[in-house]
């Protein structure tokens, strides 16, 4: 069974718990969008199978905005975390080279 | 003759201010409600423009919302004072209303571009997190070196938080950290894929029907880390 990205990330960070520099990564930022996605799915699942377009839009619209905002926030977080990871790899590589 | 000229100069100053008299728009035949309805219609037109714009640019920064509100207020003021502006200077009304419309469209264009691309992360936050990670790494290494030095001198009191590592393992530890950070980067690619699924839902929900949205939202929900029964 495949795991969700947020769970895999949490497991990865947990397996390196002795490296405190990894603690700057906060994987819980992905949790909120998961809850919003579940709300959306529940709302869509409860819709009648045939309905007018206006009713469909008005029923779903309130669930889309939070997801859109949360996705924008997570995109920022991934960009920041990726830059931290890249600079960490660079710094550690330089440190490793200096040891040789 | 000279007496008359002197008297005229005393009564009429050389440059009298020109009195502004608003142009008459209504007569006694005008219905009672017309003067009331016209300003109300103008106000509703401007408020409608503002409301539509704010719906269109829902997620923009607060400064854009304030700017559109202020411009809308100015547009209403200029519309209400059209005769006055034209009285002060010819074409002043046209210049002002054109300028305000151009500014309004520029703000809307900025907001549209802003919405197309996600906001870039704050460089200060990125720098702080990078520095924090480096500082914590340095702390880990310093603790490891301290514990190694204590062992060399016969003192056995290693830090409980950091497992003791012999000095020969330092290169391996650095390599392990490099692997860990690279694995984090790979996991972020998975998060990017999840966000693409979310974008797919957000961008296409209006054009899809209930069944299609149900499928895409179920995929998104499952990949976001919750389980759903189908």
Image (cartoon, coloured by chain):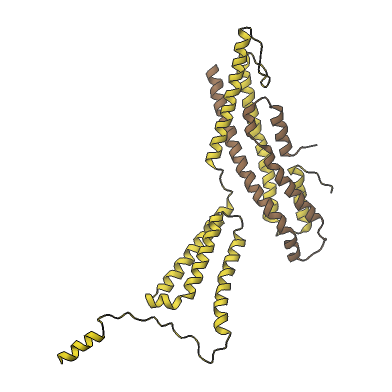
Q: Residue lying farthest left?
A: B2
The residue under the point 40% across, 74% down is B91
Residue B205, quarter of the rendered image: bottom right
**The C terminus of chain A, quarter of image:** top right
Residue B42, quarter of the rendered image: bottom right
**Is B173 rendered above or below residue B19?**
above
Q: Colour of chain A?
A: brown
Q: Which chain is yellow?
A: B
**Is A76 rendered above or below residue B97?**
above
**Horizontal and vertical percent position of residue B151:** 63, 10
**Horizontal and vertical percent position of residue B135:** 56, 27
**Is B93 rendered above or below residue B6?**
above
Q: Nearer the viewer, residue A83 or B33?
A: B33
The residue under the point 71% across, 27% down is A15
Q: Is residue A77 left or right of residue B75?
A: right
**Horizontal and vertical percent position of residue B57:** 59, 59
């Amino acid at each position: 069974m495949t795991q969700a990205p947020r769970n895999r990330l949490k497991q990865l960070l947990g397996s390196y718990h002795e490296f405190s520099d990894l603690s700057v990564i906060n994987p819980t930022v992905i949790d909120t969008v998961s809850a919003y996605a579940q709300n959306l799915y529940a709302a869509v699942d409860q819709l009648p199978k045939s309905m007018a377009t206006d009713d469909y839009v008005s029923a779903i619209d309130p669930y889309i905005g939070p997801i859109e905002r949360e996705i924008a926030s997570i995109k920022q977080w991934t960009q920041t975390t990726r830059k931290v990871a890249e600079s960490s790899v660079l710094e550690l590589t330089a440190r490793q080279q200096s040891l040789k | 003759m000279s007496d008359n000229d002197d008297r005229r100069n005393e009564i009429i100053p050389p440059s009298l201010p020109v009195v502004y008299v608003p142009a008459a728009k209504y007569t006694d035949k005008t219905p009672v409600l017309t003067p009331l309805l016209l300003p109300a219609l103008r106000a509703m037109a401007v408020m409608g423009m503002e409301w539509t714009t704010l719906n269109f640019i829902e997620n923009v920064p607060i400064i854009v919302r304030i700017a559109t509100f202020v411009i809308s207020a100015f547009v209403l003021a200029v519309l209400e004072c059209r005769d006055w502006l034209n009285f002060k200077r010819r074409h002043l009304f046209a210049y002002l209303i054109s300028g305000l419309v151009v500014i309004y469209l520029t703000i809307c264009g900025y907001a549209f571009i802003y919405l197309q691309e996600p906001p870039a992360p704050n460089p200060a936050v990125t720098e702080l997190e990078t520095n924090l990670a480096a500082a914590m790494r340095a702390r880990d290494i310093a603790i490891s070196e301290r514990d190694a030095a204590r062992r060399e001198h016969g003192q056995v009191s290693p830090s409980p938080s950091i497992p003791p590592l012999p000095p020969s393992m330092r290169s391996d530890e650095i390599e392990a950290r490099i692997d860990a950070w690279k694995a984090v980067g790979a996991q972020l690619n998975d998060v990017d894929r999840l966000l693409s699924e979310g974008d797919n839902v957000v961008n296409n929900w209006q054009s899809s029907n209930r069944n299609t949205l149900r499928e895409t939202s179920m995929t998104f929900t499952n990949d976001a880390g919750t389980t759903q029964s189908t």
